[in-house]
Amino acid sequence: MAIEVRIPTILRTYTNGEKAVNAEGANLSALIDDLDANHPGIGERLLEDKDGKSDLRRFVNVYINDEDVRFIGGLEAALSDGDQVVVLPAVAGGASSWAPSVAR
């Protein structure tokens, strides 16, 4: 079962610069295990240990066919042949329009 995984720029050092790689798994957890077996180190960038249980890191967003996995089962979200998984780092920050100006 081939599943395309889109890799963000910041994690491409683990995939030798590849924007997309193929992985296998019946659910997201198994897919990440397969991804880490073929691209060592990427798994620990996606997962963290919470109370003895693996979970997606807070600032990593994962989508299966444009659906946020947090709403479709998390690591247990089912995968099918031909699915596309997209990994996106969360982005935060920037200037606020209400911030007071700094006197010069």
Image (cartoon, rainbow, N blue to C red):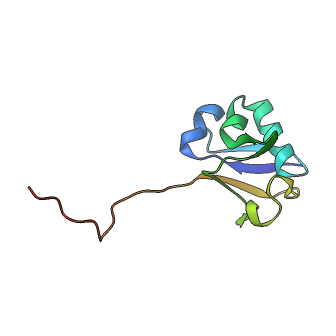
Q: Position of residue 87 (x, y in %)?
A: 66, 51
Q: Quadrant of residue 61?
A: bottom right
Q: Nearer the viewer, residue 19 or 61?
A: 61
Residue lying farthest to the top in this orientation? 40
Residue shown at the point (83%, 61%) measured from the top left: 73
Q: Nearer the viewer, residue 48 or 45?
A: 48
Residue shown at the point (76%, 34%) measured from the top left: 36
Residue shown at the point (68%, 55%) measured from the top left: 86
Q: Position of residue 94 (x, y in %)?
A: 37, 58
- Note whether 27 is above or below 18 in the view shown: below
Position of residue 19 in the picture relative to residue 104 (left or right): right
Viewer can see residue 4:
yes
Residue shown at the point (72%, 42%) measured from the top left: 47
Q: Position of residue 68 (x, y in %)?
A: 71, 64
Viewer can see residue 17:
no
* Quarter of the rendering occupied by the C terminus: bottom left
How many numbered marks are there?
Answer: 0
- Note whether 65 is above or below 37 in the view shown: below
